């Protein structure tokens, strides 16, 4: 079953590719001139269908888990997220579209996972969830889902201008043994192929994602570590300021595009 | 308890072919991977899936280690009468997950 569908999805990528090659000649832009494309547009039709149907999107399993954690009391304060924030569908509506955001506590940007853990430590008086743990991915997928379809709002906070600039510099900095910058692939060569895979534009609008290659959920930082290791660069460690700045730059670059959490990616 | 997502059409016409889609969270550990200590991680997969419709088995499958984590299983049946579909997944630890879904046939 799975081998068959995988073969079909590669075939699908081929079809999308030939469609892309055809339209690249005319510039591949919306009526309003926006040439930005979500990674969704580069996937095969089977993988797109998997993301599009909430009963076949494996990311929804994490969302269910996240909903459970949202309502579960934790920590010395014996409070659940819901005790303060109430119904996530209302209180968290559009929240994830603003992350990474400025944090007054640290005076810099923090991402959604860090915000959740800060709240957990301060208000629930509980241990923060470890990076990439099932719990943090589930909770951020659940919070992220409440912004699905809404435009990314990152990039208009003047307090973060310096961090966005630093992230942009990291995006354009060549690094690693292969001497690649992020921009070398995702700005200059998107739509072409790296190995057997189409290079997307690197719009991180669907995180945390269910990645078929991982057979699990994963954060944007996990994906970035993948990319860095692929270019034989030393990946930043989870939660490092460099990563948050890069996330911040990426999201400001995707400003206005629709949030897809929980997205499925090959 | 594992999380499941089940998609059964709530209503159907008599004689209509309906599609049932199921997704369950499970690591589907193959038994071929080694852990950080170099030792094999014991196999733990769902090896059996069955679906009954008002008590009668309409679909079953044996699953093997090559099948992905969080297996998605979809199949069709003919809607004959209103009632209950009972789905069960059994893994190598002997745990069985049971879920039911109602269908109304007009």
Image (cartoon, rainbow, N blue to C red):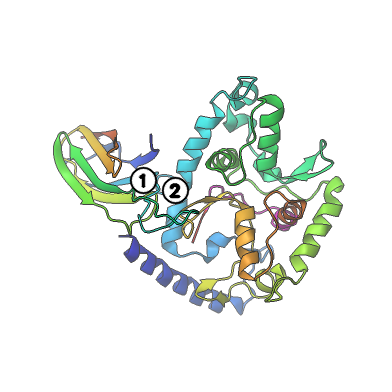
Q: Are marks 2 and 1 in contact (CB under 8 Å)?
A: yes
Q: Secondary structure at mark 2?
A: loop
Question: Is any atom of residue A201 visible in this view?
Answer: no
Q: Position of residue A49 (x, y in %)?
A: 43, 56
At x 34%, y 42%, the residue is B7
Distance Cα–Cα, label 2 vs label 1: 7 Å
Q: Chain of mark 1?
A: B
Q: Which mark is residue A58?
A: 2
Tell me where residue A252 sits by quadrant. bottom right
- Asked if residue A126 is positioned above or below residue A113 in the image, the reply reads above
Which of A62 and B102 lies nearest the eye of the viewer? Answer: A62
Tell me where residue A171 sits by quadrant. bottom right
Q: Main secondary structure of the magenta part?
A: loop
Q: Is residue A257 magenta?
A: yes
Please state if A46 lies on the left or on the right of B80 as rendered. Answer: right
Residue identifier under label 1:
B23
Q: Residues within 10 Å of mark 2 (few under 14, many from 20)?
A: many
State which region is magenta: A249-263
Please state if A39 lies on the left or on the right of B96 as rendered. Answer: right
Q: Position of residue A153 (x, y in %)?
A: 72, 47
At x 54%, y 26%, the residue is A71
Q: Which mark is residue A152?
A: none
Give the quadrant of the N terminus of chain B: top left
At x 46%, y 54%, the residue is B35
């Amino acid at each position: 079953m799975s081998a068959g569908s995988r073969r079909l999805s590669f075939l699908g990528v081929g079809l999308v590719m030939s469609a892309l090659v055809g339209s690249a000649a005319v510039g591949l832009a919306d009526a309003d001139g926006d040439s930005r494309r979500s990674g969704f547009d580069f996937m095969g039709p089977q993988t797109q269908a998997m993301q599009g149907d909430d009963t076949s999107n494996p990311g929804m399993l994490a969302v269910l888990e996240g909903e459970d954690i949202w309502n579960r009391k934790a920590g010395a304060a014996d409070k659940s997220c819901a005790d303060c924030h109430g119904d996530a569908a209302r209180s968290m509506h559009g929240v994830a579209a603003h992350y990474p955001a400025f944090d007054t506590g640290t005076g810099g940007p923090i991402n959604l996972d860090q915000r959740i853990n800060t709240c957990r430590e301060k208000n629930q008086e509980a241990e923060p969830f470890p990076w990439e743990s099932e719990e943090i991915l589930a909770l951020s997928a659940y919070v992220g889902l409440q912004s699905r379809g809404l435009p990314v709002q990152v990039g208009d906070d003047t307090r973060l201008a310096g961090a966005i600039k630093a992230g942009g510099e990291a995006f354009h900095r060549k690094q690693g043994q292969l001497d690649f910058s992020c921009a070398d692939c995702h700005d200059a060569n998107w739509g072409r192929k790296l190995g057997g895979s189409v290079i997307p534009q690197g719009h991180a609008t669907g995180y945390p994602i269910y990645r078929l290659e991982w057979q699990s959920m994963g954060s944007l930082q996990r994906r970035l570590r993948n990319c860095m290791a692929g270019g034989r660069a030393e990946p930043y460690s989870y939660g490092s300021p460099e990563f948050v700045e890069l996330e911040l730059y990426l999201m400001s670059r995707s400003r206005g595009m629709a949030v897809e959490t929980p997205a499925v990616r090959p | 308890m594992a999380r499941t997502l089940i998609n059964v059409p709530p209503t159907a016409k008599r004689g209509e072919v309906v599609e049932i889609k199921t997704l369950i969270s499970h690591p589907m550990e193959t038994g071929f991977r080694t852990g950080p200590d170099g030792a094999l991680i014991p196999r733990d997969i769902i090896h059996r899936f069955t679906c009954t419709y008002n008590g009668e088995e309409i679909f079953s499958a044996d699953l093997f280690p090559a099948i992905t984590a969080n297996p998605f299983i979809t199949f069709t049946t003919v809607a004959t009468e209103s009632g209950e579909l009972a789905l069960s997944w059994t893994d190598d630890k002997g745990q069985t997950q049971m879920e039911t879904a109602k269908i109304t046939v007009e």
